[in-house]
Image: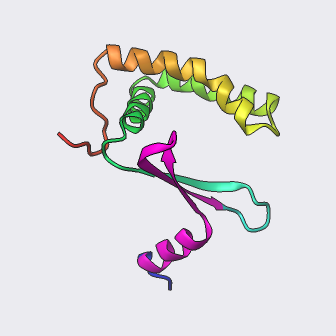
Amino acid sequence: METIEERIRRLVQEEVRVEPYDDRWPRYAWFIKRDAATRRRTHHIHMVEDHFVEHWTRLRFRDYLIDHPEIAQEYGALKTRLASAHQHDRVAYTRAKSEFIDSVTARALKNGTTKSRTHEKE
């Protein structure tokens, strides 16, 4: 059986992109695992340096959805509609979600969702 270390080494060689965010630090990496037969994404893991503020803001959006299931359902319905409308254009799909995400994120930050459920530096 493959160890975690072996798996990470293999991922780094085959399935990872590490780039500076917006041509500057911090570094931002993501792992994308695809189904071998269909090539569809099955896993998408982000890794960032702890001072990457945008990442912590994204987690607050996530936490707001967890705390407000009705908003999460709205977001799910939006994603379903957009996935259908932009089946072959991931960039358009992502852009079309932006207004909703920005609105909910602003609400989360305003309403006190200020600390992610995930470990964050004090």
In percent of width and height, residue 90 lies at 73, 38
In percent of width and height, residue 46 lies at 48, 50
Q: Residue at x 48, y 72 (%)?
A: 8
In percent of width and height, residue 83 lies at 74, 33
Q: Residue at x 55, y 70 (%)?
A: 11
Query: Please, which colouring scheme is shown?
Result: rainbow
- Residue 72 magenta: no
- Identify which residue, 25 or 6, lies in the foreground: 25
Reply above or below: 52 against 106.
Answer: below
Number of residue marks = 0
Let me know if residue 105 appears in the view.
yes
- Identify which residue, 57 or 35, lies in the foreground: 57
Q: Quadrant of the C terminus?
A: top left
- Residue 24 magenta: yes
Residue farthest to the left, as pictured: 122
Q: Quadrant of residue 51?
A: top left
Q: Residue at x 27, y 45 (%)?
A: 119
Q: Residue at x 31, y 46 (%)?
A: 50
Q: Quadrant of residue 107?
A: top left
In percent of width and height, residue 17 lies at 57, 58
Residue farthest to the bottom, as pictured: 1
Q: Is residue 58 left or right of residue 99?
A: left
User: What segment carries the magenta color?
Assistant: 5-33
Let me know if residue 77 appears in the view.
no
- Identify which residue, 79 or 22, lies in the foreground: 22
Residue farthest to the front, as pictured: 23
Reply above or below: 25 against 102.
Answer: below
Q: Is residue 76 left or right of residue 23?
A: right
